[in-house]
Amino acid sequence: MEMDNIDPAVLEVIRLLGKKWGIPVLHLLEQSAMGFGEIKDILENISASVLSELLNEFTEKGILEKREISLSPQRTAYFLTDFGKVYCQIIALIEEWGLHLVKRISKAQVRRTS
């Protein structure tokens, strides 16, 4: 099957899912809203530019919302939108399916080596 035959919306979802730091960032924001610095401190190996790009893209796509939470000092935080919460549910289903897949592969490998 060629990629030309796949719905562009499906390709966009796959592209978003494939972002290296996307799922870890969303998992953090599922727990609670956080500012840029908090996310960066927890995911210490992510570069500031990659995190900034990811947060901007997720905000532009409506997955996250950036809100001002304090004026003095000025602080902003990222929140999951309702749309973002649905996206996280999809990720959870994929993770669950992946666990079942790994178990099936492991069982098949054990049967082949027995």
Image: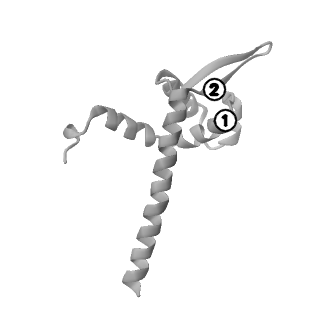
Q: Residues within 10 Å of mark 2 (few under 14, many from 20)?
A: many
Going by the image, does 56 lie left or right of 44? Answer: left
For disc 1, the marked residue is 39
Q: Position of residue 83 (x, y in %)?
A: 50, 28
| Camera sees residue 97 | yes
| Residue in the picture at 42% in, 69% down | 104
Type of the residue with mark 1: Ile
Q: Is residue 83 above or below residue 10?
A: above
| Residue furthest top in the image | 71
Q: Say which of 58 and 96 sits in front.
A: 96
- Residue lying at 39% horizontally and 37% vertically, measured from the top left: 13
Q: Nearer the viewer, residue 92 or 46?
A: 92
Q: Is residue 53 visible?
A: no
Expressed as whole percent of the image width and height from the top left, the position of residue 11 reads 32, 37
Classify residue 3 by image quadrant. Answer: top left
Query: Which residue lies at the image location 63% right of the left edge and 35% below the top edge?
Result: 29
**Secondary structure under badge 2?**
strand
- Give the quarter of the figure containing the C terminus: bottom left
Dot 1, crowdedness within 10 Å: few (<14), some or many (≥20)? Answer: many
Q: Secondary structure at mark 1?
A: helix
Observer-side mark, 1 or 2, equals 2
Compared to 96, does 33 lie above or below?
above
Q: Of label 1 and label 2, which has the lower sequence position?
A: 1
Q: Is residue 26 left or right of residue 8?
A: right
User: Which percent across, then down, holds residue 19?
Assistant: 46, 40
- Give how far apart the Cα atoms at labels 1 and 2 are: 10 Å
Q: Are marks 1 and 2 in contact (CB under 8 Å)?
A: yes
Image location (x, y in percent) of residue 4:
20, 38
Q: How is the image coloured?
A: one colour
Tell me the amino acid under the disc marked 2: Tyr
Identify the residue position indicated by label 2 in the image: 78
